[in-house]
Every structure is written in structure tokens, then in C-alpha cells.
Amino acid sequence: MKKRRYVDLYGYTSDEFDRLLERGINKKLRSAGKSRSELDMPTVFAAYEDETRKLPRRRLREMRVTA
């Protein structure tokens, strides 16, 4: 029996989503004049909110999972 599971990362694969989030974090760090060693949680959450707000929504990708 096969079940269907949907990925809800705005329709992106986890690798694509990670790349987009890392790009956003790097932008935030550059604009604040910080190095990667000074990365903190508020910067990560701000980058997440900014990048997900700007992402075009793709269709949800269907993944088939065997149960």
C-alpha cells in the first residue's frame, strides 16, 4: 500500500530551500557587517522570514512513500 506525502517547503526540495535560506542568511550578515562566526538566532529567523516572504510558491511536490 502506498501513501502520499506532500513536502511543504513552499514546493521546493529541502536542498533548494537550504540554499535559498543560506543565501538570505549571508545577505543579512553582510548588511550587518558581521562574520559567519557571529551568527545568532535572531539573524537566522529574520533571514527565514524575509526569504520565505519573497519566495514564489511552487506547486506542492508529491512524494510516494511505501508503508
Image (cartoon, grey):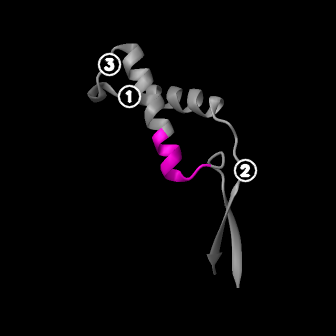
Which residue corresponds to mark 1?
Answer: 40
Q: Are marks 2 and 1 in contact (CB under 8 Å)?
A: no
Residue at point 60% right, 49% down?
12
Cα distance between the residues tagged 3 and 2: 36 Å
Residue at point 48% right, 29% down?
24
Mainly helix, strand or loop, the magenta region?
helix
Q: Earlier in the sequence, mark 3 or mark 2?
A: 3
- Helix, strand or loop at label 1? It is loop
Q: Is residue 37 above or below residue 19?
A: above
Binning the other alpha carbons within 10 Å of mark 2 as few (below 14), some (14 to 19) or many (20 upward) gives: few
Q: Quadrant of residue 2?
A: bottom right
Q: Is residue 9 above or below residue 21?
A: below
Q: Image check: 54 left or right of 19?
A: right
Q: Position of residue 28 (x, y in %)?
A: 44, 22
Cα distance between the residues tagged 2 and 1: 32 Å
Q: Earlier in the sequence, mark 2 or mark 1?
A: 1
